[in-house]
Amino acid sequence: MSWVDGANESGFGTDHLPYGLISTDGGTRRLAVRIGGFALDLAATASAGLVPSVVAHPSLKPLMAAGPAMWSEVRQIVQDLLTDERHQSTVLPLLHDVDAVDVHLPFEVADYVDFYSSEQHATNLGRMFRPDSEPLLPNWKHLPVGYHGRAGTVVVSGTPVHRPSGQRRGQDGPTFGPSERLDIELEMGFVVGVSSEIGSPVALAEAADHIFGFGLVNDWSARDIQAWEYVPLGPFLGKSFATSLAGWVTPLAALDPFRIPQPPQDPEPLPYLRGTDPWGFDIDLEVLLSSRTMREVGLEPVRISATNFGQMYWTPAQQLAHLTVNGASTRTGDLCASGTISGSEPGTYGSFIELTHNGADPLTLPTGETRTFLEDGDEVTLQGRARSAGSFIEMAPVSGQVVG
Ligand code: CA
C-alpha cells in the first residue's frame, strides 16, 4: 500500500506505476512515474541518489533499452520508495500534481507497425466490403496481418488531430477535399524495449525479454481516402496523418496478473507462431465521445462502445515473432499496435465504420445530434481497466479532438 494520498484505489497504485515524460512551466522534460494523482519526477529522484541514473534522461528510451533486469530493479526501488513511510519526507517534494504537468510523447517512436489481429473486427469489415465471399481472407488465420505505418506522426494523447484532406472516389473520377469519413480505431500498442539484430528473429518464447510495456492507441483513419487508395498496396495517406498514443506506458510487469490464454487457434499456426505462455490480456476497454455541443451544455462524454482486449486472435508475442521472422531487426521504441479491437456484438465495436454499419445507422448523442463519422470539435477518449480480485489498474487514456 502506498503512503501517497489517494493512490491505492486510483488504478495508479504501486502495482501499476506507468512511465511518462513530463515538464512543468515549459521547463526541461523529465521521466516520471505516475502514482495516484501525482507524477514522481524520476530525474530528481535519481539526482537524490535514490534510483539508478538510467531514468535521469529526458526520454524513456535508455530505461527501455536497458532490459528486463533493470526494468525490474527500477520498479522494485520505486515501489519501495512509494510504500515505505520512511521515504515519505524525502520523496513527497518530488511529486507533482499530474493535472499541473505537461505530458509529452514518452519516447521517440522508432518504427510503427499496425496489425489487424481481432478476428471479430476483420470479420465485421470483411462482411461489409466483401458480402459475397468468405469474410476472412485465406492468409488471415495463418499470420498476423499488418502494415508499416508512419512513426513520425505518432502523437501523444491530447494533441489535436487535423482533419486530413485527400483524394476520394467520386462519380466521375476522384475528388479532392477534407475527409468526410473520419474514423477512430480502438487499439492497444506494445513498445519494444530491447532491440534485436538484423538476421536474428525474436522467437515467441523470448518476447518478454523485448517487450517493455503497453499503451492505448487511436489509429485515426480517413475511410474515404483509405477506400480509394488502398488497393493494391494497403493503407497509406488514409492512416498516416495522425496516430495517438497514451502519455503513460504501462510496464509489462504491471499487466502480468491479467494475462490469460488467447482464444483457441484453428488451424494451428506454423511452428514459429506456437507457444504455451499466456499472452492474452484481460483488459476492459471503452470508447467515449464528446461533441462540441455536448461540452457547451455541460454534458459528460458518452460511452459508444465497450469491449475487451482478451479476445484478440493474435498476441503481441506472435506479432513480434512474425514481424522479425524474415530477419528484420527491431529498435528500442518500435511501436506495434494491435489492430482495431472489436467484439462480435453491436456496442462492442472499436470503430465508427462498424458502429454505424458503414454510415447506414447513425449514432444518436444525448444532445440529439447524430454521428456516422467524426465532426470537427468531436473529442474521442479511449480508456481501459484491468481488474483482479482485490484491485484494478487503469490504463492511461488516449484522447484527441478533431479540428478542421
Ligand atoms: Ca489500425
Image: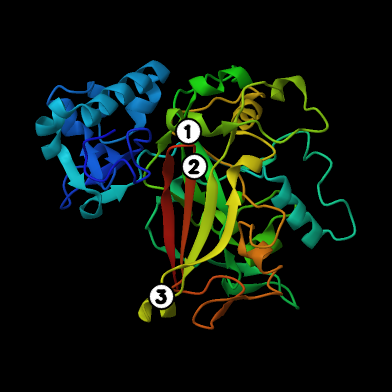
Q: Position of residue 30 (x, y in %)?
A: 23, 38
Q: Earlier in the sequence, mark 1 or mark 3?
A: 1
User: 401 or 165, which lies in front?
Assistant: 401
The residue labelled by disc 2 is 386
Kind of residue indicated by mark 3: Leu
| 236 relative to 297 in the view: left or right | right
Occupied quadrant, residue 129: bottom right
**Residue 203 visible at all:** no
The residue labelled by disc 3 is 299
Pointer 1 local density, CA inside 10 Å: few below 14, some 14–19, many at least 20: some
Given contact means CB atoms under 8 Å apart, are the residues at marks 2 and 3 in contact? no
Kind of residue indicated by mark 2: Ala
Q: Give the quadrant of the N terminus.
A: top left
Q: Give the quadrant of the C terminus.
A: bottom left
In percent of the image, x 24 and y 45: which residue is there? 38
In percent of the image, x 30 and y 35: which residue is there? 59
Q: Which mark is residue 196?
A: none
Above-or-below relation of 401 to 109: below
Say what secondary structure mark 1 lies in: helix
Mark closer to the observer (1, 2): 2
